[in-house]
Image: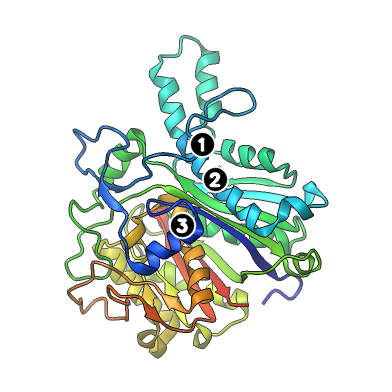
Amino acid sequence: MNAAKRCAITGMGAVAPVGRTVAEVWVAVRDGRCGIGPLTVFDADGFAYARAGQIESAPDAGARDAQGVPLDRASLFMLAAAEEAVVQAGLRERMRNPEDVAVVLATNFGGIERAAELLTEAPSSAAELDRAFREYGFQRCADLVANRFGFRGPRVALSLSCSSGCAAIGYGMSLIRAGRAKAVLAGGYDALTPFCWSGLCALRTMTRDELRPFDKRRNGTIFSEGAGAVLIEEWDEALAAGAVPLAEAAGYGVNNNAHHMTAPAPAGAGSAEVMAMALADAGLSPAAVDHVNAHGTGTRHNDSTETQAIKTVLGDRAHAIPVAANKSVLGHMMGAAGAVESIVAVMTMRDGIVPPTIGYGEPDPACDLDYVPNVRREFPVRVALSNSAGIGGCNAAVVLTAV
């Protein structure tokens, strides 16, 4: 473990297809209430796939920024999640130096919804075209969050495909450990739009029926939208200021397979390395892990290679550890996935309940771990390992410990 700085999670926020708060999202995931259905937030006619996890009405729909520019749905999701995390942590009331608070946000598509709207207006000049891309820029949401709360520390925008939300938490930890910040609002966000949906359909990784992680019948994932925010603080500073830690962010790892644009590395090598890296960073052995919150996309190759990676890292204990795939309930939340799944892992430790992997009915010899099929399980968890991966070979993992 990095002896210089410990990282406390003091606030969390979530907006997802199954709820607009952490409490609502947790109850749905815990109880296995699926949030996937017909795609209606835009006209899906003509697309190859038409099922998604969607948020039909964005929080504060129609809101504008200080300059009067309309906010895109993805930013509205992130702002709502950030508000919940900051309120839970009580950071507004006890923030002494705004320069000590950083923002690290991650996304796959950023504010592409607003950019697409502007571009369809056929900009008549270079200035109008520049405006479209300026309002779309990946850094915009980090600016919106920092400006709303008055955070004046580093602002970072990441995009590591579907490992983005998890990587944002790890990067936030690194800022605290390096002394660059005393608190970090870290998270991920994305929204479903016709532009991003066309690209997701082109990947041909989706299913037209059910998302069945680790099941023999699995034939693809289903994408969804939302945001997850985690307020991370330097441990001693947080306690001195009266904060109540929800969990410790104990270790993280980020890497890249350098193997293929979309296919996972053989035997899940990249995922195995990043999980081992996170454990080493936390100063914990594989024997300490009580639970794995899996990436679990429901695609044929991801689930089998992730299973191999978990067995590589945890060895013989892998079969005794409950492995949950939250995407079976939430759908694949893209840039938000790793952040929301880390939040679920914290709630798992708090309540001693491992949520189910729903849609599981037929075992696959290539996926032979305990996936907590269909029914939640009471199980004490002190150390949780949350794993994420994405196209381009991006991998991230965080180790969370109970307090």
Instruction: Determine which residue is flagged by label 2.
Output: 80
| Residue 9, picture quadrant | bottom right
The mark nearer the N terminus, 3 or 2, is 2
Cα–Cα span, label 1 and label 3:
27 Å
Instruction: Determine which residue is flagged by label 3.
Output: 163
Amino acid carrying label 2: it is Ala
Q: Which residue is outermost to the bottom?
A: 316
- Which residue is at the front of the view, 36 or 298? 36
Residue 257 appears in the figure? no
- Which residue is at the front of the view, 118 or 230? 230
| SS of the residue under disc 2 | helix
- Which residue is at the front of the view, 144 or 23? 23
Amino acid carrying label 3: it is Ser
Instruction: Determine which residue is flagged by label 1.
Output: 60
- Which residue is at the front of the view, 88 or 190? 88
Q: Is residue 320 above or below residue 159?
A: below
Q: Is residue 186 above or below residue 213?
A: above
| SS of the residue under disc 1 | loop
> Residue at position x 30%, y 59% from top?
34
